[in-house]
């Protein structure tokens, strides 16, 4: 074999070694962790209700909606009262919220959050009476009722000596709502499903499609950066759960844009490993100026007609620190920049300002996000 052939073979093997090492170090995750099946979603529910049985910590008589609600509730049970004569200190008007998870069935229970909407001091120890919970389309999907647990309290004599723990005007009723209606999912009815990426990216979408096609030949297409369309193979039409489970477990290497996130309030810098910079030179230093004033007193000689005079003398000192100059090659990344700045004693605030200046100079090849 000639020298040229040996050289070409050695170069190919060297490139393959580096490629394998880079692939081994690359983060690989499951499709399940970076994408979800479209249509599998939760729904928000909300309702208006009353919390009864409070120990004098409910809404005052100034809260008109409570008076009207109590009167309407009593009227449903055949009791007619004068709304003006009601005392509602043991009742509080509340908004009840819940999240309806996907695939729940009639009879399942879900947690609800109960929040006071009037001037009640606490809903601790109260009981939520039957409250229908509606979705955004106005349909009732669950009904809530039960004891309210606040996890907090308010204690005191009302004269200013009070103590409060957590928020006693917001409580939780575990398993307090019964699902009355199911949200049916139309998964796979037309022979297709779609994966929605948590962080849309063209490269990641293409890699997901490649991984699915490697397992189920020719059934996946990356529609855009945020969606991958998948045709269900005929032999999986009656076993959609196993098909989706097999897709979710497929390994894929996600790709993200280079980004540096800076928190100016705390001085925190978070960066990805693929952030690079051009050749740059950084000079870091500062000038400190100190101005001091001293008072001098001039006393006249004894038995003279002079008077005491006070004079002020100002002294100005300028101290310029030696600038620390750093030169980094184009092969450096942001971690090299931060490490070099730490080595010369730059503070987190200085590092943040320098990163902003590098970005303004066009040498930082990443998105700089300030939070």
Image (cartoon, rainbow, N blue to C red):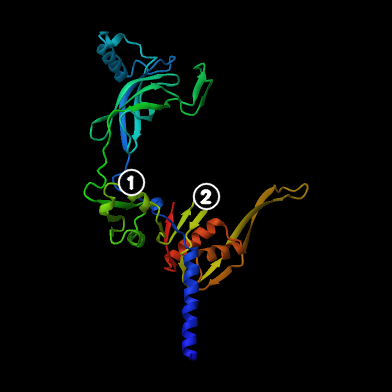
Q: Residue shown at 49%/22% (left/top)?
A: 154
Determine which residue is flagged by label 2.
Answer: 266
Residue 209, given in percent of the width and then of the height, sits at 32, 60
Q: State yes or no: discs 1 and 2 in contact (Cβ < 8 Å).
A: no
Quick one: 34 or 71, which is closer to the camera? Answer: 34
Quick one: 177 or 247, which is closer to the camera? Answer: 247
151 over 43 or under it: above or below:
above
Q: Quadrant of residue 128?
A: top left
Q: Residue shown at 59%/60% (left/top)?
A: 288
- Is disc 1 surrounded by few (<14), some (14 to 19) or many (20+) residues within 10 Å? few
Quick one: 328 or 288, which is closer to the camera? Answer: 328
Q: Residue shown at 48%/26% (left/top)?
A: 151
Q: Pick out the residue farthest to the right.
A: 302
Residue 285 seen from this side? no
Determine which residue is flagged by label 1.
Answer: 241
Residue 176 seen from this side? yes
Choose the circle earlier in sequence order: 1 or 2.
1
Between the C-alphas of marks 1 and 2, the distance is 46 Å
Quick one: 155 or 283, which is closer to the camera? Answer: 155
Task: State the SS at label 2.
Answer: loop
């Amino acid at each position: 074999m000639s020298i040229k052939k040996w050289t070409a073979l050695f170069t190919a093997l060297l490139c393959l070694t580096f490629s394998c090492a880079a692939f081994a170090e690359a983060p690989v995750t499951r499709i399940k962790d970076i994408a979800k099946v479209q249509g599998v979603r939760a729904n928000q529910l909300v309702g208006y209700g009353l919390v009864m049985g409070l120990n004098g910590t409910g809404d005052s008589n100034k809260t008109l909606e409570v008076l009207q609600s109590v009167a309407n509730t009593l009227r449903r049970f055949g009791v007619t009262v004068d709304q003006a004569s009601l005392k509602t200190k043991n009742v509080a008007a509340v908004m009840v919220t819940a999240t309806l998870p996907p695939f729940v069935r009639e009879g399942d229970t879900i947690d609800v959050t109960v929040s006071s909407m009037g001037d009640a001091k606490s809903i601790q120890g109260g009981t939520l009476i039957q409250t229908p919970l509606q979705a955004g389309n106005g349909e009732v999907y669950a009904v809530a009722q039960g004891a309210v647990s606040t996890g907090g309290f308010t204690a005191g004599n009302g004269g200013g000596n009070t103590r409060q723990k957590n928020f006693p005007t917001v409580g939780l009723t575990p398993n307090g709502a019964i699902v009355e209606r199911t949200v049916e999912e139309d998964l796979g009815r037309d022979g297709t499903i779609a994966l929605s990426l948590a962080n849309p990216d063209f490269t990641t979408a293409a890699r997901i499609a490649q991984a699915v096609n490697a397992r189920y030949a020719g059934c996946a297409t990356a529609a855009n950066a945020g969606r991958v369309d998948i045709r269900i193979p005929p032999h999986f039409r009656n076993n959609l759960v196993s098909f989706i489970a097999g897709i979710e477990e497929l390994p894929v290497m996600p790709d993200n844009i280079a980004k540096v996130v800076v928190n100016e309030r705390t001085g925190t810098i978070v960066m990805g490993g693929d952030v690079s910079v051009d050749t740059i030179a950084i000079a870091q230093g500062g000038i400190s100026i100190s101005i001091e004033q001293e008072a001098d007193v001039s006393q006249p000689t004894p038995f003279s007609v002079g008077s005491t005079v006070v004079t002020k003398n100002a002294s100005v000192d300028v101290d310029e620190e030696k600038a620390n100059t750093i030169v980094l090659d184009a092969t450096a990344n942001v971690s090299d920049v931060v490490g070099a700045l730490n080595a010369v004693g730059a503070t987190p605030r200085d590092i943040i300002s320098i990163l902003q200046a590098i970005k303004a100079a066009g040498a930082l090849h990443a998105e700089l996000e300030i939070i």
